[in-house]
Image: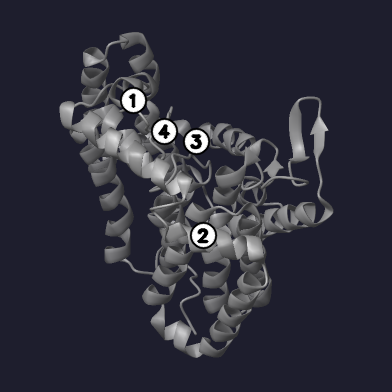
Amino acid sequence: MDIRDRDTRWGLLVPISPALGLVYYCTLLTKCKEVIKNIRSDRVTYGALIGLLISGMISAALAPDKGQALINMPIPLVFIFIYALGRWGIVNARDFLKAITLGCGLLGLVVFASHLLRLNIWHGSFPILASFHRGRGNVLGMADNGLAAMLEAGIAGGLGFFLYKSQHRWLYLAASLSALLGVFTTYSRGSIVGSLAAIIILIAMNSQMVRKHWKVIVVLGMIVVICISQWPGLSRRIMSIANVTTNSSNVGRLQIWEVSWNMFKDHVLFGIGPGHYGRTYALYRPDGYIKARSPHSLYFFVLTGWGLVGFTLFFGWMAVSIIKPLIQDNTAYRRIAFAMMISFWVHVLFNDLYIAHVPLIMGCIAHPDLASSSDTPDHP
């Protein structure tokens, strides 16, 4: 991995702040013509873009505030285009994934150290390393669940590169543990569940290598369990995940999801209109239910705003684009990239978030640099 390489440099930086991810998008746009050419030649991606454009326009046309709906309508289209930037704009996908892993590990160290030092540093009204003195932390504007989601890819990535990469193996494992420690510091339950799901999937997809390193994995598991048991606030937070009777956050989410489902049932095909959730929720909310401006689930965000047609087009595209490369050429790098992005899609069952490097990682799964014909770490 060469720090002078463009994709490596940006891989280290994008986990730090979504703003850096936006700058990297602009860098990748220098290959816009090639990316668009490849989109047009990929029937699944091109078909999804055309389908979502048409269905989104219909959703917007049926919405009460058509101008607001048109402004929000391109959201899934932009997501797919960023995926395309990762798939056809990134040159060195392997080192990009390794660099993201190390960047997440570095961010995890910063988060945990800031927590220990109880930092609250601001530049005017902009948070630098803030809210660690009496909160869950804020790094450059990303706080709580959003901050945790920035770290997630490094957990599965570090463990995956430890299993397969002989050189610097322990550095990647350290990055994985550091990112996990950062997630613990944020107390994000959605991120903890997502990270656990990613680790389980990574282990299931790489059973041969897991058997080779099972002693290390068992020791790591014991260390994590001991860490949780000795961290009272974290232990209580994890125990509350399954409490759907007295935990106000969980009860509130269930209420929001119930209202979201009722909204969807009345607007099945094309939804209530992109960007209309807050105003529509107020009309459907029963007395005594929690107030909300968002559905606290990315799946309900798409389902209510774009309807069943938009939901099927978007997530159908995603399933084919991610799973097809794994079936056709199931390399170690692709399995690691899959685990790196899956934690996000589990996390957003409970939150509606956007993390800049996630669609890029998704694009890397189908990248030719991760194919078996390239230099992969598949050899034990």
In the image, what residue type sits under mark 3? Lys
How crowded pointer 2 is (Cα within 10 Å; few <14, some 14-19, many 20+) is rated as many
Dot 1 or dot 3: first in sequence order is 3
User: How far is the residue under mark 1 from the one under mark 3?
Assistant: 41 Å
Is mark 4 in CB contact (under 8 Å) with mark 3?
Answer: no
Is mark 2 in CB contact (under 8 Å) with mark 4?
Answer: no
Assign a secondary structure to mark 3.
helix
How crowded pointer 4 is (Cα within 10 Å; few <14, some 14-19, many 20+) is rated as some
Residue in the picture at 17% in, 32% down:
265
Dot 4 or dot 3: first in sequence order is 3
Dot 2 or dot 3: first in sequence order is 3
User: How far is the residue under mark 4 from the one under mark 3?
Assistant: 46 Å
Q: Which residue is mark 1?
A: 281
- Foreground mark, 2 or 4, reads 4
Would you identify the image quadrant in which residue 74 lies?
top left
Q: Which residue is mark 2?
A: 192
Q: Tell me if I can see residue 69 in this picture.
A: yes
Q: From the top left corner, tell me how far across and down residue 266 is, in percent.
A: 17, 27
How crowded pointer 3 is (Cα within 10 Å; few <14, some 14-19, many 20+) is rated as some
Assign a secondary structure to mark 1.
helix
